[in-house]
Image (spheres, rainbow, N blue to C red):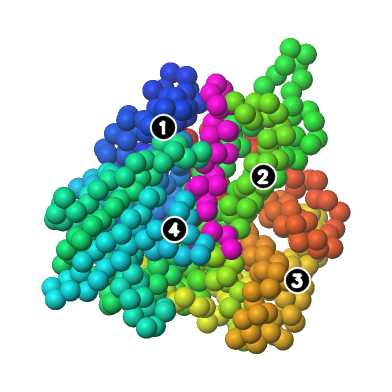
Amino acid sequence: MSPSERIGRLERAFGPLFSADNPLGQHALLAADARGEVLAGAERVLDEFGLNAEFVPAEYGGRLTRLDVLGRVLRPVFRRDASLGFGYGLNGFFAAVPVWTGGSAEQCALAARLLLEGRRVAVVRHEVAHGNAFVRDEFEAVPTADGFLLNGTKTVIANAARAGGLVVFARTGGENRARTTSVLLLDRAELPADRIEDLERHETSGMRSAEFGGLRVTDCPVPANALVGELGDGYELSLRSSLVIRGLIPSIVLAGGDTALRTVVRFATRRRDDGRSSLDVQHVRDVLAGAFLDLLVSDSLALVATRALHLLPKQMSAYAATAAYLAPRLIAESMDEMSTVLGKQTFAEDGAYGMFQKQLRDLPVTSLGHAGSAGRQVSILPQLPFFARHAWFADPEAGGELFRLHEGLPPLRLPEAALLGDGDPLAATLVACTDLLEAADQEAEDRQGASALRFLARAFTVELDDLRKVFVDIAPDDRKALVSPHAFGLADRYTLVLAAAACLGVWREARGEGDPFLADPSWVTAALYRLGRRLGLPLPDRPTGSEQRVLAEVLARLHGARSYDLYGSPLA
């Protein structure tokens, strides 16, 4: 079964989200959310589909062969309920990634067995300054003659009480501060029950149905073969895991943004008694088109981040961090704009438009992650002085396969993913696309309305050159300069430049793939204009024709029941 067929099967199993007759539709989901419960029927759908198999590499009996496909499989779930998607299985994938990355064959087989049996696997994170715990607490594993003695308390763990497997980041000591943490893979059924205590569940304002509880472990013996990798590998395994996890974050948040946009478009197109609708207002049309563009930009970043893990493992670090940093920001801001269209309906927790408020509540939880946006910027910044000296305007561009939605990929090679990139082929794609547009026959291109796109591409290339001039004067080891507010602002600008490059790459490759909307320069012109406005770049006249084409696609996808992403997938 092809990925699209598999995704379509899952979508149809849930049924129409907005149908009042669907027992798995929005009314049932909102009622379960209000009770703080996951809808049992929705979990049964995932049981029958075997969602956990999507998180297990094919070599261990699962269906995971492509990270971009995994991001797409998650969308039908997260369009409906982030608590369902996160609590049922995605949190288990987050827990298992350190095992897939650094575990032995036996440990990978154990993690696979737990997931394929339908059991939950929870991750117990180590404590850091930017930690996502409500209070500071952590675990300690003291080495013994035949393993470890585990002690500690963690009060906020997703699926703590339901988990059959635990991936524990625990302090194991040592003089090297970077190697004080190790990772343990535990089958809870094999541990003495009297040494592990489940703590109370915490209520959350977002993802209300997800179970965030705690664990207290007291003098629990752990076998030596539970250690993943080597003693002290915890910090590195956490960083390497983030390269995988970050690439999936845009798919999660844009799925919620899809439902939010669809809810607002349904509201805006309803006819009042006088025959008018909110769509008659220019501001409303601008908001809807802008929100769709933000989803397309986010999906372009998602595509690059996930496919780069297969194609560019030595260069993908900055792309994964950019995707995880920028996509949640774009979608959060567009949801704020959409709330001006809904007005008081923004606060409705049930009824026809209640799904907007749910997605608004869930977004901060689904997008923050363990490190948050600042942590993602921090992982980008040390790479920029190197890029300025050795990569920008010198690297070859990325291959076209990086931007092709459906083309096959080489196998995942997680251990090969580099924490710091040795080049920036995505930035080189921006330069190449700019040269392509400027080399084309201008008279013919202008008849197609491409002069604005040519101007915008050049403006982003100039911005990249400005960034080069700044970072070439910053020493790679100048920590003071790299953690200054000014540097963080420059990192933000760099992410917007990469977003423009990703969009141009998707558009360029789509011209030969047969999707008339993605092949049309209208969406990429409007997207770059919107990104350029955020950057404060000199801009051409507003591309109103392009924006009208984008709005027409918004309405066509509403009436044709297709997703608001690059794929335009059929909806139930």
Give, as a three-letter code, the residue at label 3.
Glu
Residue 43, x across and y down, in percent: 32, 35
Residue 179, x across and y down, in percent: 37, 78
- Structural distance between the alpha carbons of marks 4 and 1: 25 Å
Q: Nearest to the eye among marks 2 and 4: give it.
A: 4
Q: Earlier in the sequence, mark 3 or mark 4?
A: 4
Magenta stretch, residue numbers: 349-374
Q: How packed is label 4: few (under 14 Cα within 10 Å), some, or many (20 or more)?
A: some
> Magenta region's main secondary structure?
helix
Residues at marks 1 and 2 touching, judged by CB atoms closer than 8 Å? no
Q: Is residue 514 found inside the magenta-colored segment of the image? A: no
Q: Earlier in the sequence, mark 3 or mark 1?
A: 1
Q: Earlier in the sequence, mark 1 or mark 2?
A: 1
Give, as a three-letter code, the residue at label 2.
Ser
Mark carried by residue 463: 3
- Structural distance between the alpha carbons of marks 2 and 4: 33 Å
Q: Is residue 348 or residue 64 the one in the foreground? A: 348
Give, as a three-letter code, the residue at label 1.
Gly
Q: Quadrant of the C terminus?
A: top left
Q: Earlier in the sequence, mark 2 or mark 3?
A: 2
Mark carried by residue 136: 4
Residue 271, x across and y down, in percent: 70, 19
Q: Is residue 451 or residue 464 the one in the foreground? A: 464
Q: Earlier in the sequence, mark 2 or mark 4?
A: 4
Residue hosting label 2: 334
Left of 335 or right of it: where is 19? left
Residue hosting label 1: 36
Give, as a three-letter code, the residue at label 4.
Arg
- Structural distance between the alpha carbons of marks 2 and 3: 24 Å
Left of 58 or right of it: where is 535? right
Q: How packed is label 1: few (under 14 Cα within 10 Å), some, or many (20 or more)?
A: some
Q: Earlier in the sequence, mark 4 or mark 1?
A: 1
